Each structure stands twice: as C-alpha cells, then as structure tokens.
Amino acid sequence: MTKPATIAKNKYNAKAYDRIALQVKKGEKDKIKDHAQSKGESLNGFINRAIHETMSRDKTE
C-alpha cells in the first residue's frame, strides 16, 4: 500500500471506529485466534461476535 493510501485508510479508521485494548494471559491470544480461524473468522470478527452475542443474551435474562 502506498503511503498516501495508508494515511487515508488510517484517517478513515480513526473517524469510523473506536478502539478497545484487550489484555489476555500469555498464550491465550493464540488459542482464541486458532478458535476463530477454525470457525472461519478473523480474531477481530470473533471478538465482536462474542461481545454482541453476550450483550443480546444478557438482555433476555
């Protein structure tokens, strides 16, 4: 990716998305990533799905 394209992408991402830092114990990231990949998802996609499914489930309790 060219430098101007990277700058444009970063500018868009900063405007369109919030960032959340997540800490897990050493070795957990690889386990989570492997699980996500086994389901055909990216790590980010899996974490977002887990959050949204939990929030939806918590509403029905």
Image (tube, grey):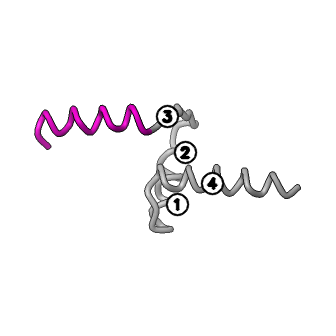
Q: Please give left or right for residue 60 compared with residue 16 in the image.
A: right
Which tag is nearer the camera, tag 3 or tag 1? 3
Return the residue at label 3: 18
Tell me which amino acid carries mark 2: Glu
52 in relation to 25, above or below: below
Q: Distance between the residues labelled 4 and 1?
A: 12 Å
The magenta stretch is 1-16
Q: How crowded is mark 3: few (under 14 residues within 10 Å), some or many (20 or more)?
A: few
Residue type of the residue flagged with mark 4: Ala
Figure label count: 4
Q: How crowded is mark 2: few (under 14 residues within 10 Å), some or many (20 or more)?
A: few
Q: What residue type is labelled 3?
A: Asp
Residue, x 52% and y 37% (percent of image)?
Answer: 26
Element class at badge 1? helix
Residue at 65% x, 53% y is: 52
Ranked by sequence position, the earlier of labels 3 and 4 is 3
Q: Which of marks 2 and 3 is in front?
A: 3
Residue 50, label in figure: 4
Q: In which quarter of the image is the N terminus?
A: top left
State the image coordinates of residue 10 (x, y, percent, origin top left).
29, 34
Determine which quarter of the picture holds residue 40.
bottom left
> What's the distance in space between the residues labelled 2 and 3, CA to CA?
23 Å
Callout 2: SS: helix
The residue carrying mark 1 is 35
Tell which circle, 3 or 1, labels the residue nearer the N-terminal end: 3
Residue 28: numbered disc: 2
Element class at badge 3: loop
> Mark 2 or mark 1, which has the lower sequence index?
2
**Residue type, label 1:** His
In space, the residues marked 3 and 4 are separated at their CA atoms by: 17 Å
- The reply to whether the C-beta atoms of the residues labelled 2 and 1 are less than 8 Å apart is no
Quadrant of the snapshot with the C terminus? bottom right
